[in-house]
Amino acid sequence: MSDTNPHRNAEAVLTRAWQRRGPLACALWPLSLLFGALAALRRALFALGVKQAERLPVPVVVVGNVFVGGTGKTPFSIWLIEALRAAGFTPGVVSRGYGGEQDVAEVRADSAAARVGDEPLLIVQRTGVPLVVGRRRVQAGRALLAAHPEVNVVISDDGLQHYALARDVEIVLSDARGNGNGWLLPAGPLREPASRRRDFSVANLPAGSTAPQGVHAMRLEAGLAVQLAPPSAQRALASMGEGGGGGEEGVRIAAVAGIGNPGRFFATLRSAGLAFAEHPLPDHYDFAANPFAGLAADVILITEKDAVKCRAIEAIRNDPRIWVVPVSARIEGALAEHIVEKLRERPTA
């Protein structure tokens, strides 16, 4: 599964450059000044009232990140949905979607990922929450509330930089990569300065690491593997190397991940005691080319985000070697209580 795509290789080079202030990052630094100026201007237009942010009739919680790429927003959003439900709220979600073809569309459990995006589809399949995708979050929010008047709080997934939608709570996620080299795009990995305001900070960290002061640590936990092919057998993740995959000792395991930070998925598997060959794919990989066909492995472990697309492809969904590893977020501290308290402070319309 060697990758000879020049675009992906260039992306990998840039991602590595973002972790330090080396020659490539320094060469791109002047462009980051322009990017920062344009981003600051856009924020100022809303802050000064030149452009008006629109407010929905219910509270809005924005979940996002300033670091480009995956920081764990999807498992966090799933956690937040369940936490709000436990507090008596009826949440709904709006999302941009990734690669979606429609301006506004409600996502259902049987929707096609190519039309609505893999992450929104995963959220709906895991939680059953009402969810609408759209290029404009305000329109998506209005459509959501029109179709589901019972919704009394809206979560804007990955909507931190979408200032046209007024928000009551901002939650910024990060991970073990921190702020990289601390520079804005394209010299660094940041969409906005790391110092930008927020109500709460959450860091997606591996076990044993400590979050900075004032930051809530998030741990992703995985205990099971679920076979992609029917009847979707389940096994303890830690037992996947114990002969069950190929029927013999010395099972060959491959881990394949098309997410923003594949290394985090691989670290989760290593923490379960597994040894495997790593096969990272580009984020939002569409699986039009089957990456598993020539893979020498008895067991192939994939993410839930990849699984929502793989289930739509017959040659992949019937491969008995493929097992999905669901993850759940555990948040340290009283973040849920703080969010609920802030939501209840919002004046009623």
Image (spheres, rainbow, N blue to C red):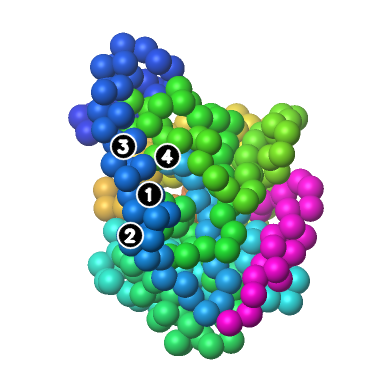
Question: In the rendered structure, which amino acid carries the disc numbered 4?
Answer: Glu
Real-space CA distance between mark 2 and mark 1, rounded to the nearest whole angstrom? 8 Å
* Residue 129: percent from left, percent from top: 56, 74
The residue mark sitting in front, 1 or 4, is 1
Q: Earlier in the sequence, mark 3 or mark 4?
A: 3
Q: Which residue is mark 4?
A: 192
* Residue 102: percent from left, percent from top: 27, 71
The residue mark sitting in front, 3 or 2, is 2
Q: Which residue is mark 2?
A: 50
Q: Secondary structure at mark 4?
A: loop
Q: Earlier in the sequence, mark 3 or mark 1?
A: 3
Image position of 133 with respect to 324: above or below: below
Q: Which residue is mark 3?
A: 37
Real-space CA distance between mark 4 and mark 2, rounded to the nearest whole angstrom? 20 Å
* Residue 336: percent from left, percent from top: 73, 59
The residue mark sitting in front, 4 or 2, is 2
Q: Earlier in the sequence, mark 4 or mark 2?
A: 2
Q: Which residue is mark 1?
A: 44
